[in-house]
Image (cartoon, rainbow, N blue to C red):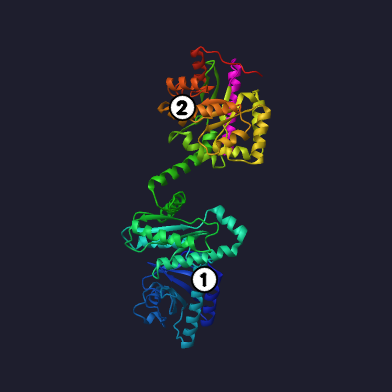
Amino acid sequence: MLDTLPSENFDRITRLAADIFGLPIAAVSLTDVNRQWFKSKVGVDHNEIPREKAPCANVAETKKPFVIRDFQQDDCYVDSTLGCAGIRFYAGAPLVTADGYALGALCVLGTEPRDVTDKEMATLCDLAAMVMDQVELTHALGRIEPCSGLPNRFQLMNDLTDSALRADVGERIISLLDLAQTEQFERLSRVLGPSHFDTVIHAVSSLLTEHVGPNATPYHVGPTQFAFFAPDNSDVESYMILLKGLLCEIEGDSDTQISMTPAIGMVSYDPQTMLPEDILRSLQSAVQDARESSAKIELFSPAMDLRHRRNFRILQDFRSALAASDQLSLVFQPRLDVATGEIRSAEALLRWDHPVLGPISPVEFIPVVEASAFARELTDWVMHKAISHISVWGKRGLRFKLSLNLLALNLEEGDFFERLMSKLVLFDVEPNQIELELTETVMMKETEGAFGLLNQLKTAGVQLAIDDFGTGYSSLAYLQKLPADVVKIDRSFVAEMENGNRERVLVRSMIDLSHSLGYRVVAEGVETQEAANLLEVLGCDEIQGYWLSRPVRSEALLDWLIARQRPVVLLAG
């Protein structure tokens, strides 16, 4: 409460005390380390006085009412700050919490000597009790979660800070229980109503209170999250066993079984070296890692935390990368027609050269961006750049086809088709010069809208390819459903071909099955002459990989084509 704004709830009591005693000065005085600070005051201009020789400090230290009839007749206080300021009379009643801690005093002061009756002191003590009612109420409103009755995140932060100030030493263990993911919580509240959720919170609060014992308390730090300390001198491995039992107990409770997947994150920390903010952030990191583990309990990992923080940096910096002219770029990996030796098309691949982190692999940054609000902007940037390259090549006499990777989110965008078509018109590029690759993740968006978009693209002349074929459990089923033109065999199968007959038979089966369904087959990840020769024997239509060419920039691709002295196929308009 120190240094907080004035409050009418306190001022009302202070005014009443001054009126009852008929004195010009009254205050709610809180005792700090070196000062007396006035939460409420009447007849005083300043907000604090030194604690030394302050009568309110005596009240706080003794927890008893205290009266100075005349400062000039009191050897201790005659030269105090108040005595020197002309104060002659003081009466103070202690402000004591329910658990016996004295915070300061409610005091009245006058500029003339004065006697005080027992009735007046009893009244002053009653008014002090009213002040403490307001203190406790203010404390509860700001520090207690009404739903559970447990201390909240602000109280936990205070307690962590106090632990450091007390110079507590040795490793401590703190855990964070997360009952449900956000979507589970929202679904639960929507279906069962808030009263059921309150029942769950009360049940878990009781379990945790029993778990930490009578000398500790859990904290309700979020709608579905609870933090709690392990007993002193606990070691991580032994305490993790106890947490597993606690998790089983929570999962087995009838009130928490529906639509909830509890997880627990742990942090082992030194109060003297780790800031409270970092402890709470590390707890959140640990509990997210726990959600991805089979045990649903994880100890904070600095390495995993570093990865999460890097992902955040990537996401934070991606907006500026989109606006910059020298960070994002496209490179192109050509595809070879096995039968004719012609270069018919290339795959456009995104690269990011971060000004601080250096080159960032698309395997790292694309999943991060794809799950964010920047996914749409990323798609538009790639489409714009890729189609503009096709246009530039066309003006140089090369009518080329580019393959672009489609994000899962694109199938949910109602205007994706219009955006793609508008860019084709802008750069005077034909739809059949674009091939969109769909991965297993994209194909799992089995909705009427998704298939409607794919059929719309197919009708317009845009080609579709099934990427990473063979890696997804439902690929065969989707071969019958998707209006695709091309199947791209994943590089992992191509790499295994030279290891044995079974691996070659598997690739042959993929090629034969795709051909029987009317697909053209492209093999990715071809890195050796032997693999290229084998794919030709197996009947593969096109190959792509380092054996043919690494991904290169636009000018390098054109130079490479000229150097090969191969004809470039002019696709029919």
Q: Which residue occupies 58% across, 64% down?
A: 196
Q: Which residue is mark 1?
A: 137
Identify the image quadrant of residue 448.
top right
Q: Which residue is mark 2?
A: 504
On the image, the x and y values in percent for residue 503 come to: 45, 29
Q: Is residue 156 left or right of residue 256?
A: left
Separation of residues labelled 1 and 2 (CA atoms): 76 Å
On the image, the x and y values in percent for residue 362 come to: 48, 34
Residue 103 lies within the magenta run: no
Region in magenta: 375-400
| SS state under label 1 | helix
Answer yes or no: is residue 507 visible: yes
Task: Please state which of residues 6 and 549 is positioned toward the viewer in this rendering.
Answer: 549
Question: Please, what is the three-letter code of the amino acid marked with disc 1?
Answer: Leu
Residue 381 lies within the magenta run: yes
On the image, the x and y values in percent for residue 10 come to: 53, 72
